[in-house]
Image (cartoon, rainbow, N blue to C red):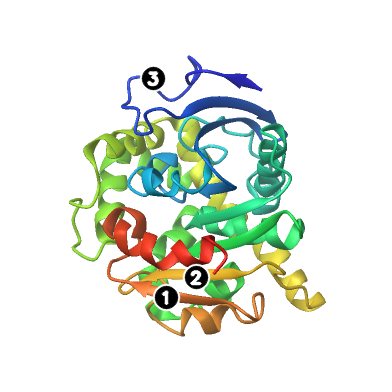
Amino acid sequence: MNSGPAPEDAVTTDLADLFPGFAAHNIDTEAGRIFVRQGGEGPPLLLLHGFPQSSAMWHKVAPALAKTHTLVIPDLPGYGWSAAPAPRADHAPYSKRATAAALVKVMEDLGFAHFALMGHDRGARVGYRMGLDHPGRIDRLALLDIVPTYVMWHRMDRARALQVYHWSFLAQPHPLPETLIGPKAAWFLDWTLASWTAKKDLSAFDPRALAHYRAAINAPDHLRAMCEDYRAGATIDLAHDEADLAAGRTLLCPTFAVWGEVGIPSRGASPLEAWKALAPDITGAAVPCGHFVCEEAPDAVLAAVGAFLAGG
């Protein structure tokens, strides 16, 4: 493990530090070098971001959470300042299983054998996969604005396909989506972020955080990594979910779902109903926003998860 600022081969070092006073680590794993912020006091809480963002998405809720928890905030492989694993035909390096295993190592290297986890979007998918593959590691699991991958694919009708067109677009074979997005990657990112908010604009996002997100998607290896993430979601991740369902495996840790009132899971079946097969005892709550709950409604998210993370 190396400590200090992001390495010179990171996406860029000319970005604002949104976590003042937090330590920075670069930790080597089977998924490559993972960049991590660490700060706060108390029991460990792993925070995992989603697409098309980075660890910067937690900056509005981190100060409050750091008062009660030791926060570990990585960039997922191929996002932010973390390295992008070499792609493979089976997309396994970007499977949620591989990412979950790499993050278990990160936590072990930092001295945490078990911990709470809160994930948003793709990070939440890594979170529930970790809970299924590594029972006993996660004390409590909070899942922000997702339903399981198998539910997304198996219930994909016209309305859902139009809502989440990116699931099939980004999963197309390389280099189709990369070629189409690349010349206007920042525009694609801004349009995607705005379109998934309740207000349909970028007002919820700190300009400093936007700079982080734009820098990553403008790096060709990171753009490909984001597409590989979705290629894995359409193939190997779906197969892993289906195998767990067939075997009757479920999450053993207490699990809590938060979703935006106008977010992606809010349209269609109840988010809690969608989780029942994998998390029979799940509880949860809606918050007044779109998909990017921690940036659109940080106070509401903190209120929703506070008692749960405290063990209540």
Q: What type is the residue that disc 1 sits on?
A: Ala
Q: Closer to the N terminus: mark 2 or mark 3? A: 3
C-alpha distance separating marks 2 and 3: 34 Å
Taking the spot 38% from the left edge, 79% from the top edge, the residue there is: 267
Residue on which disc 2 sits: 257
Going by the numbered disc 3, the residue's amino acid type is: Thr
Judge left or right: residue 58 versus residue 42: left
Number of on-image labels? 3
N-terminal-most mark, 3 or 1: 3
Count residues near mark 1 (Cα–Cα under 10 Å), then give few for <14, some for 14-19, many for 20+.
some
The residue positioned 47% from the left and 53% from the top of the image is 170
**Quarter of the view holding residue 239:** bottom right
Q: CA distance from mark 1 to mark 2?
A: 6 Å
Q: Residue at x 35, y 28 (%)?
A: 17
Residue hosting label 1: 285
Residue 63 occupies quadrant: top left
Circles 1 and 2 in contact, beta carbons < 8 Å:
yes
Q: In the drawing, what numbered circle is on residue 13? A: 3
Q: Is residue 57 above or below residue 194?
A: above
- In the depicted view, which residue is nearer to us: 224 or 248? 248
* Amino acid beneath label 2: Ala
Q: Residue 2 placed where, x, y %?
A: 62, 19
Label 2: element kind? strand
Q: Residues at badges 3 and 1 in contact (C-beta under 8 Å)?
A: no
In-image side of 286 versus 4 (left or right): left
